[in-house]
Image (tube, rainbow, N blue to C red):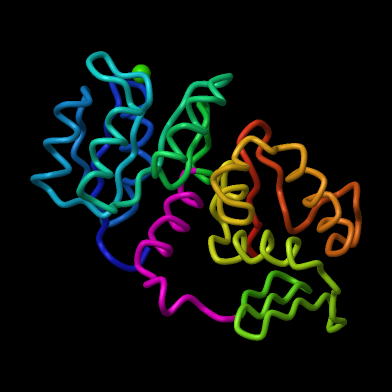
């Protein structure tokens, strides 16, 4: 990673903190470890970190409350760490403005991939988002609104294009069902997950060369979708 990282880790479990410390030992990183939500919020305010890793199950206040309070004044990337089976908590954290999540247990590879994507999106000004996203054979030209697969234009409906464009603007990051419904259909349709699934299935049929083996769009079960990035 190019610049020195300043992390605030908010996590009450010592083994996870140890794992995180070890994961970043090769990087030029400084890590502040908070074991409670209140201490974590104070640390973010005083240390101005480049990224926050936040456990949702904390001894004092709920991790979701930490996300809510941080988002009142900072856009620092927040990656939540959640226990398996707590899908609703992850979704709530993302809807409150967290950037991504990791489910315990996670590997160093997953951790670093999430951190890289979050940092890149944080640095990129929305106005200067790259107009063309290329993932393998798939090319999404957000300026011209043209999608091609191995050089052939893919005919998408207006809704399919909008869904793909949202994922492309946030490539590598998970987008919740609610966020997608909200952006394409508006807040009144936040619960229309069936409609979303139908349109996503149609979109996939057009862009995934192998329908049973999704290459570009990954479903994050119970959470949303993620546009994969080229390695
Ligand atoms: Ca915990």
Q: Is residue 112 magenta?
A: yes
What range of the chain is rendered magenta? 111-131
Is residue 205 among the parts visible in the rendering? Answer: yes
Q: Is residue 182 above or below residue 194?
A: below
Image quarter for residue 87? top right
For the N terminus, the quadrant is bottom left
Residue at left 62%, top 78%? 142
Q: Is residue 121 magenta?
A: yes
221 or 30, which lies in front? 221
Quadrant containing ligand 1: top left
For the C terminus, the quadrant is bottom right
220 or 198, which lies in front? 198
Q: Is the magenta region chiefly helix, strand or loop? A: helix
Return the x and y of residue 183 as percentages of the image width and height.
56, 55
Is residue 177 among the parts visible in the rendering? Answer: no
Kindly give the residue lying farthest to the front in the view shown: 188
Kindly give the residue lying farthest to the left in the view shown: 46
Q: Is residue 60 above or below residue 210?
A: above
Return the x and y of residue 140 as percentages of the image width and height.
69, 75
188 or 231, which lies in front? 188
Image quarter for residue 155? bottom right
Residue at left 62%, top 59%? 167
Q: Is residue 116 left or right of residue 50?
A: right
Residue at left 34%, top 34%? 54
Q: Is residue 98 left or right of residue 10?
A: right
Return the x and y of residue 224 as percentages of the image width and height.
63, 42
Mark count: 0
Kindly give the residue lying farthest to the top in the view shown: 59
Image quarter for residue 135? bottom right
Return the x and y of residue 40 as percentages of the image width and height.
19, 33
């Amino acid at each position: 990673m190019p610049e020195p990282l300043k992390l605030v880790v908010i996590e009450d479990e010592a083994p996870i903190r140890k794992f995180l410390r070890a994961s970043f030992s090769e990087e030029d990183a400084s890590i502040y470890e908070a074991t409670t939500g209140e201490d974590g919020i104070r640390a973010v305010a005083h240390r101005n970190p480049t990224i926050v890793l936040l456990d949702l199950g904390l001894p004092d206040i709920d991790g979701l409350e930490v996300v809510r309070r941080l988002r009142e004044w900072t856009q620092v990337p927040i990656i939540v760490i959640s226990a398996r089976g707590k899908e609703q908590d992850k979704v709530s954290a993302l809807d409150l403005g967290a950037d991504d999540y990791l489910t315990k247990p996670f590997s160093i590879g997953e951790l670093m991939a999430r951190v890289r994507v979050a940092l890149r999106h944080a640095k990129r000004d929305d106005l200067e988002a790259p107009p063309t996203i290329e993932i393998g054979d798939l090319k999404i030209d957000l300026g011209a609104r043209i999608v091609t697969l191995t050089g052939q234009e893919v005919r998408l409906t207006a809704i399919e294009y909008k869904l793909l464009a949202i994922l492309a603007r946030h490539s590598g990051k998970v987008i919740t069902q609610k966020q997608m419904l909200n952006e394409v259909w508006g807040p009144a349709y936040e619960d229309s997950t069936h409609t979303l699934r139908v349109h996503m299935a149609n979109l996939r049929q057009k862009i995934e060369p192998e329908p049973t083996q999704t290459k570009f769009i990954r479903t994050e079960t119970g959470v949303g979708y993620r546009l994969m990035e080229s390695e």
